Amino acid sequence: MVESPASRKSLPLGRLVLIAAVVAAGAIGFAYTAGWLSPHRLTPKKLVAGLAPPGGPAPGHRRNHAKGICFTGTFEANGDGSALSKARVFERGRYPVVGRFNLATADPNAKDAMVRVRGLGIRITTPGGQEWRSAMIDAPVFPVSTPKDFYELLTASGSKDPNAMKNFIGAHPGFLAFAGWAKSAPWTSSYAEERYNSLDSFLFVDEAGAKHAIRWSLMPSALPVPISPDDLAKRGPDYLEQEITQRVAGSAQRWDLVITVANPGDPTADPNKAWPADRRTVNVGTLIVEQIEPERDGPCRDINFDPAVLPEGITTSDDPFPAARSAAYSRSYNSRTAEEAAYPRTETGAKQ
């Protein structure tokens, strides 16, 4: 068929219209993601801004869990996890780890005894370049059920209205489970004595393609020694970092990585809901912390412990938090790296 002059002229116009439509659709999607078309929609910008203390964020630092210290070590997989997931990280062997002990505060200079929640972030790498990143805390449940609820908690806790938290709890009674833990659970005097929990649910995918809803915990080998917040305060504002540095210098510290497998019907979309204690568990290996390094020049400083960075064989579930955390972590990372001059490395510090 011979193309007419008219059709030759109309073809570029048609392509331009198609290109314009694609660009417009992309722009609308980007605007929606940024919240420009829906001012009441929760966005990463709003969520991260909600974490800031009254005086604003600490330039150059993470917007939450700002106080922390780096470590390096090894994950020793025992092979038992391979029945649940085809991820290389569960094949028997040793895999390098970079991690970070931290406190759940936006203040990098916070006193240890003033922060109830402690955290641990890890990045495990395997041959072939795949990574498993995770950010865990010592609480047994998350304070709320959804990212929107979390933003409302941040808003209420920062409000000058004396009834703000009372009204929040009235609308979110699930918060009482977390509050009960925060009020009654014993404090410890070491990061090494804490159990750290994923709280979020993920899916393990095995070699046959079957999916298993799971959560995980790092169970310490060190026995917890309770301490009151007042006694912890007497040991100094940065005692936890000093203690873990000395402890690991004396001997490597270990945690068993224990996977909890959900039963049908267990809530996977709500980290505020604990699973029953009788659920099946599998010990898949041991995290060994071998060396502690100050964060300023340490290997964890520039790592974003994004829980959505997962190897083949692990994927997200219907839990909304990993995606929300990933977006918020990205914004926090971009902000703090742009402010690097406010948190400079020492002259001898090398970029990782």
Image (spheres, grey):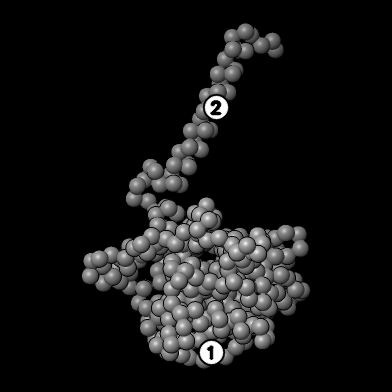
Q: What is the quadrant of residue 253 in the picture? A: bottom right
Q: Quadrant of the C terminus?
A: bottom right
Q: What is the quadrant of residue 32 in the picture? A: top left
Instruction: Give the CA separation, mark 2 to mark 1.
Output: 64 Å
As helix, strand or loop, the secondary structure at mark 2 comes to helix
Judge from the rendering whether residue 21 lies leftward or rightward of residue 247; answer left or right: left
What residue does disc 2 label?
18
Mark earlier in primary sequence (2, 1): 2
Seen from the viewer's position, the closer of residues 337 and 92 is: 337
Q: Please tell me whether residue 86 is drawn above or below residue 226 in the rendered image.
A: above
User: Residue at image x 59%, y 18%?
Assistant: 12
Judge from the rendering whether residue 194 lies leftward or rightward of residue 256; answer left or right: left
Dot 2 amino acid type = Leu
Seen from the viewer's position, the closer of residues 329 and 293 is: 293
Q: Quadrant of the N terminus?
A: top right
- Where is residue 236 shown, x and y percent of the image? 46, 83
Label annotation for residue 224: 1
Seen from the viewer's position, the closer of residues 133 and 71 is: 71
- Where is residue 218 shown, x and y percent of the image? 59, 78
